[in-house]
């Protein structure tokens, strides 16, 4: 089927192309009768306005760019879920790209999205993003930018995060309050802010509870996987027989820890307690079910999009926009991988 | 920062806008010296051609539309992963939408993508897609369309699938060959072709092995979840004490089955064997690890995109394009939820 043009509609109705165009735009200098006839025929022929021409006129693309480290990951796919669903409802389409934790790819993707003239960009940084010129460029181009989850504090733009330090503090206190005295931390890579913050929260919880920090109890993931959790559990079991609690940086890592201890017949939580981070949907399903921190992916996507659309709207109206940082609440989810306890208070 | 325009480059170099434009397009009637100066300044000022104007000229959007039932799903997120990664390498960006298993939403999304003038559409149908006019419209608009995984045979376009019937036949034969005599099937919903095909593969395997088909052994999922698997396992345990094998339509359902039998102390695979479908990454991690069918998500995304780009290219060159159906190979992955057996052959 050929594309239907304004010309064809004009010819069929015996009126000018200008009149057709005006009728489709609801201009008032076209008679209601003519307008109705044009709209009816346009509908019948399934006429589609050339979106490129519309874009050129409005200078809006009604698309948003989204860059995440990886899509095959429950937390990020929940975020993408929220963003594409809510964006569609507001009339925006979403171009998704994944940086695969590469700064180079992330830079290239920012350029692609700017070239594409997206109306705004949402990004969660790769673990290797140590420079921010490419992000500053987005701001310099006057394109609204919102960072979420993995952010940098160095940029003047809106952000949506959780308080990783507080959440990790709560997770560690949960282990301490349930009786753990020697707690290992399987942490994330050294660079990302959220891995640093979770480590600092763990350390602060020890301090506040007068437990000496012991750096030999820190194990550092490179890729933050189930397999690393399994491997570090084995290492803990060999090197640190008296560890009675493990705080893992994410649930998949914690599930690797559980798998190892299950395999060698060490009882969870009687002999060792495990707590994860993120409340991955598998965490309630494994045996024993995993105590964890609730990290609200869907909410995060929703909030980030909302902030971005607000800024796009303000920009369109040439209004000032005050950047915001939204900190979403988290909480400890108590399941069967940690002991019950009575609060000290 | 304001957008840099051709006019500004022209003014700064003291040449005409036309010359700047020609230089940027590498036209030969601009001297190499001038061209070099223009390119250098354009680069320095970070000049970006107006992509809307470029689109209007080329009538190509260099974007692809992708509609999937849901993104928070390991199989589909693997497919999206492959598509956005490979598309980017070929210079295409991907607009992703999810139908949430709703035909109405799917129809609306097809219209959105056509309005957006995407160069092609990739789609895996919702479970409720019983009519195909909206898909026929894509073809009528001369926009390349490729169906994958959940398809309809009624459309004349390229398709990428696995042979669900054969794969289910193999899964069921694996249970029979490992000694199972009474095998329940937890099937998918009644409408989608792949759920029908898996059911038919199961039935054929029974027939070929002279086991009478018993419809009381068929349990039908509505949402294909872990919870349904758990619930049906309970039902099987109550109603059909002598069932010694379960073939579940997907891995999450099978993992629900395992969770129930683990809980009530029924030994897998000694008392009952379980096989799933899809090779979800959690399947190798649970205890006992789950035997399953390898369903190649990444490969499927890659093949679907490749076919689409071929068709887009052919269309651009006004060449005939022969639609293809690619059937990707699958295989049984033997793990610990089924008994070992010696092949009959």
Image (cartoon, coloured by chain):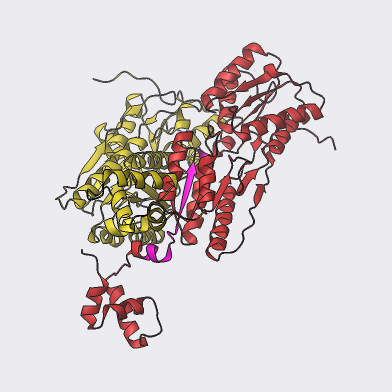
Chain colours: A yellow, B red
Identity of the residue furthest to the front in this view: A14
Of A61 and B41, nearer the camera is: A61
Image position, residue A174 (x, y; %):
33, 28
> Which residue is depicted at the point 27% across and 61% down?
A137
Q: In this image, A281 relative to B144: left or right? A: left
> Which residue is depicted at the point 60% across and 23% down?
B220
Identity of the residue furthest to the left in this view: A320
Q: Where B147 falls versus B36 (above or below)?
A: above
Residue B249: in magenta span: no
Image position, residue B284 (x, y; %):
59, 37
Of B297 and A254, nearer the camera is: B297
Q: In this image, B243 relative to A90: left or right? A: right
Of B166 and B95, nearer the camera is: B95
Q: In this image, B344 relative to A136: left or right? A: right
- For the question of whether residue A253 can be seen, the reply is no
Placement of the C terminus of chain B among the 4 image quadrants? top right
Placement of the N terminus of chain B among the 4 image quadrants? bottom left
């Amino acid at each position: 089927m050929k594309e239907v043009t304004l010309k064809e509609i004009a010819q069929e109705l015996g009126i000018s192309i200008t009149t057709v165009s005006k009728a489709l735009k609801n201009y008032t200098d076209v008679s209601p009768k003519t307008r109705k006839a044009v709209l009816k025929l346009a509908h019948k022929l399934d006429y589609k306005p050339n979106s490129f021409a519309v874009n050129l006129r409005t200078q809006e693309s009604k698309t948003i760019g989204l860059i995440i480290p990886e899509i095959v990951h429950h937390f990020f796919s929940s975020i993408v879920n929220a963003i594409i669903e809510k964006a569609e409802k507001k009339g925006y389409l979403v171009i998704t790209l994944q940086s695969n934790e590469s700064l180079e790819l992330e830079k290239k993707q920012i350029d692609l999205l700017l070239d594409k003239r997206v109306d705004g960009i949402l990004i969660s940084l790769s673990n290797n993003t140590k420079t921010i010129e490419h992000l500053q460029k987005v701001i310099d181009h006057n394109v609204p930018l919102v960072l979420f989850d993995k952010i940098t504090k160095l940029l003047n733009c809106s952000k949506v995060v959780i308080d990783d330090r507080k959440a990790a503090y709560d997770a560690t206190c949960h282990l301490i309050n349930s009786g753990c005295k020697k707690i290992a931390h399987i942490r994330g890579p050294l660079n990302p802010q959220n891995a640093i913050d979770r480590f600092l929260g763990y350390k602060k919880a020890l301090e506040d509870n007068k437990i000496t920090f012991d750096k030999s109890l820190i194990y550092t993931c490179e890729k933050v996987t189930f397999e690393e959790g399994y491997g570090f559990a084995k290492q803990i079991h060999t090197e640190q027989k008296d560890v009675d609690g493990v705080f893992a940086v994410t649930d998949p890592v914690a599930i690797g820890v559980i798998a190892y201890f299950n395999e060698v017949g060490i009882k969870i939580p009687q002999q060792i307690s495990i707590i994860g981070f993120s409340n991955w949907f598998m965490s309630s399903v494994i045996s024993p079910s995993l105590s964890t921190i609730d990290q609200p992916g869907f909410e995060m996507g929703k909030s980030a999009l909302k902030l971005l659309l607000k800024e796009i709207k303000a920009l369109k109206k040439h209004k000032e926009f005050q950047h915001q940082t939204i900190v979403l609440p988290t909480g400890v989810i108590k399941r069967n991988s940690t002991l019950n306890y009575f609060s000290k208070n």
